[in-house]
Image (cartoon, rainbow, N blue to C red):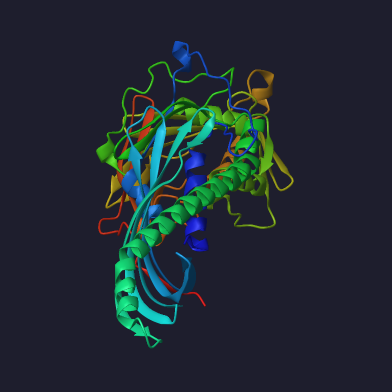
């Protein structure tokens, strides 16, 4: 009843949901990773991230129509029925208003079948239609997914298309008995379909959640926690049309925001809305880069592993000259969001280009961000500012030599920070379905917050076209 392809899509979407729900879980046993202790927030520890995901986007990613055609053999009320059936099914979900995350999975199917049975020397041919409506509610709480038993309602109606009595006496009675038994047979078919649907729904979802929890803990949550990069879910809830999460990206020695989440992106801003306080980015960058000495390949690999994409500027143009950065221990990378401008400051204790050592420097670049023609556009404001960080007697040794170093750094960082860049599509997972394509719908940078909204491309279908699969 449940196809492997649909199971994989379920697994993918819930893994994706867990990326933005990074608390620990207890599904099918002990938690793989312990939930961070709930924080008692002081003013400087207020949440610095907010994510909103629309129900429409979840269905664009997950909802699916399927058609399967297969033979069957069933024993109903002591009679064996053989034939073929065609199942047209629709899988979708809806979000429920709840102080936690509440999702109801929906599976609706229509099964059209033709069958043949023989009993007491009476051959019966029939066709039937069975309707199934099933649902299963999942609630994401602090200790993991709480799963309610599947519910299913069914109805079945059949029609006799052929009847042959292979005996000399009692033909009329046999024929009447066959027609009298049809309502009982239909009720038995509906009851069997409901029981099987509940069992398969429960088993499939439980197996899926147990599998993805272990994978997510091993591949994502635990590596992030070991590097103090795991955000804490401060608040999570769902509404009739979205999931909403508020998070804090900060370890015990870092700050969140003083103002809290005061300028949220309205839900109309898009199917995915992200509000990021500059402290969230800065804390993440500190945990990732502080005191590290990374060459361009290592830096690209780090970003690729944690963020899923690599900036084009980290692709080396000269394979004979590799450069590396010795990041500052306290403030390796900082951003500031204000009045449509994003200011990026990189502080390094030193650089290495091939065998050439370059003293520490502060690099600063500003971009004006906007959304134009459904694209995110960044325009650099002026040139990259490069200043030496040496002070006192050490500064005397920089002098004119640093002009040469500045030129070398400019050539390298002009590729990483180009004069203008354009994102035509929001970055998404590698297996993102084409019918769920997104575009940038809103962007603003003000009051230390960066707010981005992405929407589904108009006309994208909620469900994909039916897929015909024959089972022999």
Q: Is residue 119 left or right of residue 451?
A: right
In this view of the protein, which residue sits in the foreground, 324 or 404?
A: 324
Where 72 falls versus 287 (above or below)? below
The residue positioned 59% from the left and 29% from the top of the image is 286
Residue 283 visible (yes or no): yes
Residue 332 visible (yes or no): no
Residue 220 figure quarter: top right
Where 49 falls versus 316 (above or below)? above
In this view of the protein, which residue sits in the foreground, 229 or 215?
A: 215
In this view of the protein, which residue sits in the foreground, 135 or 334?
A: 135
In this view of the protein, which residue sits in the foreground, 153 or 293?
A: 153
How far across and down, in percent of the image, does residue 236 sit? 42, 29
Q: Residue furthest right?
A: 355
Q: Is residue 208 left or right of residue 360?
A: left
How far across and down, in percent of the image, does residue 467 sit? 40, 70
How far across and down, in percent of the image, does residue 233 sit? 48, 28
Q: Is residue 341 left or right of residue 233?
A: left
Where 25 falls versus 109 (above or below)? above
Q: Residue furthest front?
A: 169
Q: Residue furthest top?
A: 42
The residue positioned 45% from the left and 53% from the top of the image is 195
Total labels: the figure holds 0
How far across and down, in percent of the image, does residue 178 sit? 34, 73
């Amino acid at each position: 009843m449940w196809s492997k392809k649909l199971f994989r899509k379920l697994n993918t979407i819930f893994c994706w949901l867990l990326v933005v729900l990074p608390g620990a879980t207890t599904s099918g046993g002990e938690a793989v990773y312990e939930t961070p202790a709930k924080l008692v927030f002081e003013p400087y520890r207020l949440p610095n991230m907010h994510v909103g995901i629309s129900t429409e986007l979840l269905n664009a990613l997950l909802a699916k129509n399927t058609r399967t055609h297969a033979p069957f053999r069933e024993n109903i009320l002591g009679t064996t029925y053989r034939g073929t059936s065609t199942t047209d099914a629709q899988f979708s979900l809806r979000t429920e208003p709840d102080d936690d995350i509440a999702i109801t999975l929906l599976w609706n199917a229509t099964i059209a079948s033709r069958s043949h049975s023989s009993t007491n020397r009476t051959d019966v041919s029939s066709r039937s239609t069975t309707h199934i409506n099933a649902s299963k509610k999942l609630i994401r709480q602090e200790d993991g997914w709480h799963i309610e038993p599947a519910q299913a309602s069914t109805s079945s109606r059949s029609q006799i298309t052929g009847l042959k009595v292979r005996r000399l006496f009692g033909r009329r009675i046999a024929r009447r008995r066959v027609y009298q038994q049809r309502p009982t047979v239909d009720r038995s078919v509906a009851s069997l379909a409901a029981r099987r649907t509940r069992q398969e729904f429960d088993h499939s979802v439980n197996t899926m959640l147990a599998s993805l929890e272990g994978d997510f803990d091993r591949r994502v949550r635990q590596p992030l926690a070991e590097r103090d990069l795991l955000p804490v879910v401060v608040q999570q809830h769902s509404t009739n049309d979205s999931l909403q999460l508020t998070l804090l990206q900060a370890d015990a020695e870092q700050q969140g925001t003083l103002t809290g989440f005061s300028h949220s992106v309205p839900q109309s801003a898009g199917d995915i809305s992200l509000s990021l306080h500059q402290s969230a980015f800065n804390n993440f960058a500190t945990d990732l880069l502080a005191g590290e000495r990374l060459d361009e390949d290592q830096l690209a690999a780090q970003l690729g592993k944690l963020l899923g994409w690599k900036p084009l500027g980290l692709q080396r143009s000269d394979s004979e000259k590799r450069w590396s950065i010795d990041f500052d221990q306290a403030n390796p990378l900082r951003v500031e969001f204000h009045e449509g401008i994003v200011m990026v400051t990189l502080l390094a204790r030193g650089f290495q280009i091939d065998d050439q050592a370059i003293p520490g420097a502060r690099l600063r670049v500003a971009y004006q961000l906007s959304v134009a023609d459904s694209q995110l556009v960044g325009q650099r404001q002026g040139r990259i500012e490069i200043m030496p960080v040496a002070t006192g007697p050490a500064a005397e040794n920089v002098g004119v030599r640093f002009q040469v170093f500045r030129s070398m750094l400019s050539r390298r960082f002009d590729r990483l920070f180009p004069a203008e860049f354009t994102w035509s599509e929001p970055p998404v997972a590698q297996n993102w379905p084409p019918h769920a394509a997104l575009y940038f719908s809103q962007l603003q940078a003000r009051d230390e917050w960066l707010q981005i909204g992405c929407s589904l491309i108009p006309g994208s279908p909620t469900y994909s076209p039916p897929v015909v699969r024959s089972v022999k």
